[in-house]
Amino acid sequence: MVAGVAPAPQRGRESILVVEDEAPLRALVSRLLAQHGYQVCDAGSGAEALARWRGRGGRIELLITDMLLPDGMSGAQLAGRMCAEQPALKVLYMSGYLGSTVSPDLELVEGTNFLPKPFTPDVLLAAVRRRLDGG
C-alpha cells in the first residue's frame, strides 16, 4: 500500500437487508452496497423488513438496521426475531443517538457490530466486510 492511500473497498456478493426509516439515507446506503456487488433489499420499518426477509425465504446474510424504527419495533427487537429463525444471520446496527434504546444484554462495538451516524462510505463498506467475514 502506498503511504497515505487507503486500499480500495472489497467487493461482495452477499445478500444484505438495509432497514432505515430515513428514505434518503436508506437509498444512499443501498445504492453504495449494490455498487460494490452486494445483493440489497431495503425497508423503512421493522414490519416491512420482516415482510421483505420472509419474501426472500429468510435468505439474507447481513441485516443492517437503525436502532430506532418508526413502528414501535427497535432494531434490536427486529434482529432478535430474525436471528431466532436464522441463527447464522449477522447484524450491523447503526444509530445517530442511542440513549436508552439499547438493551443491557446487547453489546455494541463500534466498527464491529455498530456504526455511529454519520459515517463515510469507506467506513460503512469496511464494517460490512468485517461483519460478513466474521468480525
Image (cartoon, rainbow, N blue to C red):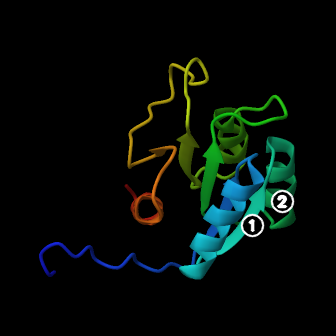
Which residue is rendered at x = 39% and y = 42% of the image?
110
Residue 44 placement, left or right of 84: right
Residue 104 sits above or below residue 55 on the image: above
Q: Secondary structure at mark 2?
A: helix
* Residue 78 image point, x, y percent: 72, 40
For label 2, the residue is 52
Q: Quadrant of the N terminus?
A: bottom left
Judge whether residue 60 can be spotted in this image.
Answer: no
Question: Looking at the image, which is closer to me, 133 or 21?
Answer: 21
The reply to whether the C-beta atoms of the residues labelled 2 and 1 are less than 8 Å apart is yes
Question: Which image quadrant for residue 33?
Answer: bottom right
Q: Which amino acid lies under the numbered mark 2 shown in the image of this protein?
A: Arg
Q: Which mark is residue 74?
A: none
Residue 68 sits above or below residue 13 on the image: above
Which residue is rendered at x = 58% and y = 17% of the image?
100
Residue 85 placement, left or right of 117: right
Judge whether residue 111 can be spotted in this image.
Answer: yes
Q: Quadrant of the C terminus?
A: bottom left
Residue 59 placement, left or right of 121: right
Q: What's the CA distance linking mark 2 and mark 1?
A: 8 Å
Which residue is rendered at x = 71% and y = 49% of the image?
20
Q: Secondary structure at mark 1?
A: strand
Q: Which amino acid lies under the numbered mark 1 shown in the image of this protein?
A: Cys
Within 10 Å of the Cα at label 2, are there few (<14), some (14-19), or many (20+) other Cα atoms?
some
Q: Which mark is residue 41?
A: 1
Residue 18 sits above or below residue 116 on the image: below
